[in-house]
Image (spheres, helix red, strand yellow):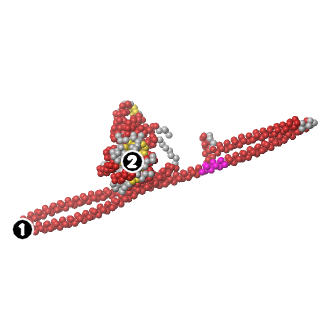
Amino acid sequence: MAEEKKKGGFFKKMFGGKSKDEKLAEEAAQRAAKQQLVDEQMAARMAAINAAALKSAREQDEASGIVEAEVDTAEQDRIEAEEKARAEEQAKHDVQAAKKLAEEKKQIEADHQADLIRIAEEKRIAEEKAKADREVAEKEERERLAKLEAEKEAKAAAEKEARELAEKAQADAKAKEEARKKAAEEEAAQKAAEEKARRKADEEALKKAEAEQSAAAARKLKEQQESERKAREIEEARLAEERATARKAEEEAESARLAELKAEQEKLEAEKIAVARAAQVSEDKIKSLQPEQKKGFLERISDGLKKSTSQMSDNISAAFTKRQLDDEALEELEDLLIQADFGIGPATKVTTLLAKDKFDKQVTDMEIKVALADVIAEVLTPLEKPMTLTGAKLEIILFVGVNGSGKTTTLGKMAKRYADDGKKILIVAGDTFRAAADQQLRIWGDRAGAPVMSGKQGGDAAGLVYDAIDRAKNEDYDILMIDTAGRLQNRTELMDELAKIVRVIKKQDESAPHHSILVLDATVGQNALLQTEAFKNIAGVTGLVMTKLDGTAKGGVLVALSDKFSIPIHAIGIGERIEDLENFSAPVFAAALSGVADAMKPIE
């Protein structure tokens, strides 16, 4: 209560205001004062009315002859005095009654005011208790989230250690096999050399024996040599068989150990997914307890591209603060843009645009950023194409890209969007080689309320897709979303398997896949160009989604990629949340990436 009074005094000093309770008390006092004044005025009027009534009655009596004429003046004065006294007594009595009534009303008003103050105090105490309970709940959730994050990091460390052990075991096995092969080759070469030397020695001995002894002795020596040779061959065959048996046992033991390591790694990945799911639930719960502060579209994009923008802006500001734009400056600017992964074409366009109007003039970093924004918008605007459905009875959407690009997460976010729009969705876990991919999809399937269809680990992905299309048609699904294994663009056999999936889809529906979306990881930089070229040829890519722009300074690669391939851009990923998958807007992206958007933000 003392704190509340202190707080009230502070607000009075700062803003000249009054608390709610003070205002209510003041209004009640004003009402009581007004009522008392009215009561007093009423009592006075009643006294006047009584006096007037008595006077009127006397005058009527006089008029009717009731009062005798012989009443003298003294008697008349006495009567009038008595009437006046009675009137005053009556007025006094009326005033006392009015005062008593006013006091009763004032007491009632005071009791009412006390009730209001009590209710307000109870409400304040309840609000403070609710606030304290909410803070305790938030604190507990934050502590639980921190614990989950620590467990997640521990699981990640364990997973990394298991992966390193598996890789080391594979490397050791490979080195051991190479050493064994090399030793076997050396042993075989040595035996061949020894055999050749023995044969040469035998031939020389035979020639010498033939020359020195009779033909019979020579035949006997030859038979003895042949017997010794056969004995050596038998011994070598026995040794070779023993080596093969030992090698087979070693290979089986190594295979069993690798299988055990793989199972442990898959278990760690499953636990990691479970921890991630629990962490996401906790994050969602904390967000529900806290008031949501929404940022504008431009601000969200600018925040997501901050790493790309900051590094490039700092370099440009450092090099071009009131500097004359000559050939050396243009060359330096072109190098900066190429280092920021914009590509040679867009970098040359920027320098050409500046040289046209600003050559041999002083330029500011903002003038360069505006020119850069113009070129980025010029390259990207024709490719700005938000994801829209074709209207097919069964819309088939294929997602391709290498492992770790955010392909599965992007599929899950888009599935949630379409599910929120009322679409009936079936998800296919086409990555049959990685157990964690299936588990990750099931988490997104739960969020979107969409079933996930999967097959045996290591099974035929194309056959699974064929069955999924049949099921989607028979059960009247609106959209079929197909995840695929992370194909490496330099692995021919894996890319052939992806091509097989595309052929199976077209065999079911010649117009499908209606969308073939390539998901690229911005952190790979220029390597995204090689990935795009490979997947474009194999999967007939119809659109791009660029992810992880918030985690890299290589956001300019989207400009270089668009300048070379001109593939429509559907969306960009600037975070892990569902709302962080933004529909692509070329002007907004250009303003954010160039740093022009930073100059548009209000100064805090």
Name the side, left or right, on which 63 lies relative to 492. Answer: right
Residue 378: name its quadrant. Answer: top left
Q: CA distance from mark 1 to mark 2?
A: 96 Å
* Magenta span main SS: helix
Q: Going from the N terminus, do you reach mark 1 or mark 2 first?
A: 1
Residue 165 in sight from this viewpoint? no
Q: Are marks 1 and 2 in contact (CB under 8 Å)?
A: no
- The residue singled out by tag 2 in the image is 394
x 52%, y 51%: residue: 138
Q: Amino acid at mark 1?
A: Ser
Residue 548 painted magenta: no
Q: Which mark is residue 385?
A: none
x 36%, y 60%: residue: 260
x 36%, y 43%: residue: 542
Judge whether 556 appears above or below 354 on screen. Answer: below
- The residue singled out by tag 1 in the image is 214
Q: Position of residue 365 (x, y in %)?
A: 41, 36
Q: Closer to the camera, 329 or 342? A: 342
x 11%, y 63%: residue: 203
Over which residues does the magenta segment extend? 115-126
Query: As drawn, which residue projects farthest toward the right?
Result: 70
Callout 2: SS = loop
Residue 367 in sight from this viewpoint? yes
Mark 1 or 2: in front is 2
Q: Closer to the camera, 371 or 108? A: 108
Judge whether 66 appears above or below 512 on screen. Answer: above
Q: Position of residue 182 (x, y in %)?
A: 24, 58
Q: Amino acid at mark 2?
A: Leu
Callout 1: SS = loop
Residue 124 painted magenta: yes
Q: Residues within 10 Å of mark 2 (few under 14, many from 20)?
A: some
Q: Position of residue 132 (x, y in %)?
A: 56, 51
